[in-house]
């Protein structure tokens, strides 16, 4: 575990010996390069980083867009859905012309049109316990922006088990929450919520609605966290859950401590293998009687 984490952090913060920017890159990233906290070395770290974005929807769209604009060299996009016209109110990677297309295809096209210098890797699949480790192993940081609890818990657990930094967020109506997980240094998602809620306990965005611009605000915070992780600058939201209430325009950080009995990130975890919670939750539900 510790050795694997060292490899992840070493890749992010390895010494930069050659900057070798092209003239176009110097001009493109000039507003970053003039920042003392970034500079040429920091920009090269961004260019060499690999980030996986889980979900090309309301959160994944602004995250991926700003990571591409910043110059993150390799961006993976995981989504097995197609673009629906109801997505366009908040999912800015897609346009009306993309309705019916695979989201990963639309996302790749949009990101490359913004920054053709990048490698965009589409994953047209649903993450599960059998494929997630092979997907995340080549990435330095993971961004979780899905719309369901089973995926959030799966990604959290996989990142803790592989010591991979993670930005995790959720949105609902006019509210958003963001947490950055630095495995074995700060709390994980299960320190906050040990188990997924039962299916149907919380309405989906389709049922309850979501304020479109608020998704952008939360996604931009996630993108900011990812770039800070890559640079090793500033304080990320490790140990702090940032709550955003759009109607009151209020950001409020809430302290989250590591749970010494966390089933995943404690010294003696009770969960040591990945779980497909959709299946597990389905099995736990009582049988539905046939209609009268």
Image (cartoon, rainbow, N blue to C red):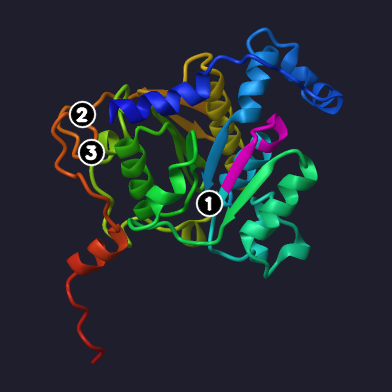
Residue 259 is marked as 2
Magenta-colored stretch includes residue 77: no
Q: Distance between the residues labelled 3 and 2?
A: 10 Å
**Could you tell me if residue 182 is visible in this image?**
yes
Say which residue appears at 54% left-offset and 33% top-offset.
222
The residue wearing badge 3 is 264
Q: How far apart are marks 1 and 3 (CA)?
A: 23 Å
Q: Is residue 5 rendered to the left or right of residue 59? A: left
Q: How crowded is mark 1: few (under 14 residues within 10 Å), some or many (20 or more)?
A: many
Looking at the rendered structure, the secondary structure element under dot 2 is loop
Quarter in which the N terminus is drawn: top left
Tell whether label 1 touches label 2 (CB within 8 Å): no
Q: Residues within 10 Å of mark 2 (few under 14, many from 20)?
A: some
Say which residue appears at 61% left-offset and 15% top-offset.
16
Residue 259 spot, x, y in % from top left = 20, 29
Say which residue appears at 77% left-offset and 18% top-offset.
31
Q: In this view, does 285 lie above or below 50?
A: below
């Amino acid at each position: 575990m510790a050795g694997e984490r060292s490899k992840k952090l070493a890749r992010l913060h390895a010494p930069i010996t050659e900057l070798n920017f092209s003239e176009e890159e110097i001009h493109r990233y000039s507003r970053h390069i003039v920042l003392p906290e970034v500079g040429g070395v920091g920009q090269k770290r961004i260019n060499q980083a690999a980030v996986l974005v889980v979900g090309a929807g309301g959160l994944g769209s602004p995250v991926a867009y700003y990571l591409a604009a910043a110059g993150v060299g390799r961006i993976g996009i995981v989504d097995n859905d197609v673009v629906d016209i109801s997505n366009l109110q908040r999912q800015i990677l897609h346009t009306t012309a993309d309705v019916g297309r695979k989201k990963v295809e639309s996302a790749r096209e949009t990101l490359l049109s913004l920054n053709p210098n990048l490698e965009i890797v589409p994953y047209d699949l649903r993450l599960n316990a059998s494929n997630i480790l092979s997907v995340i192993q080549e990435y330095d940081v993971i961004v979780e922006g899905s719309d369901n609890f089973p995926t959030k818990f799966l990604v959290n657990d996989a990142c803790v088990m592989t010591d991979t930094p993670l930005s995790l967020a959720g949105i609902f109506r006019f509210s958003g929450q963001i947490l950055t997980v630095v495995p074995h240094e700060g709390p994980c998602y299960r320190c906050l919520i040990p188990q997924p809620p039962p299916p149907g306990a919380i309405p989906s965005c389709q049922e309850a609605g979501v304020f479109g611009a608020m998704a952008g605000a939360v996604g931009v915070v996630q993108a900011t966290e990812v770039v800070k992780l890559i640079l090793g600058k500033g304080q990320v939201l490790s140990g702090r859950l940032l709550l955003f209430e759009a109607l009151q325009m209020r950001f409020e950080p809430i302290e989250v401590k590591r749970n010494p009995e966390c089933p995943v990130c404690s010294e003696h975890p009770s969960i040591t293998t990945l779980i497909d919670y959709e299946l597990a939750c389905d099995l736990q539900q009582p049988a539905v009687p046939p209609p009268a």
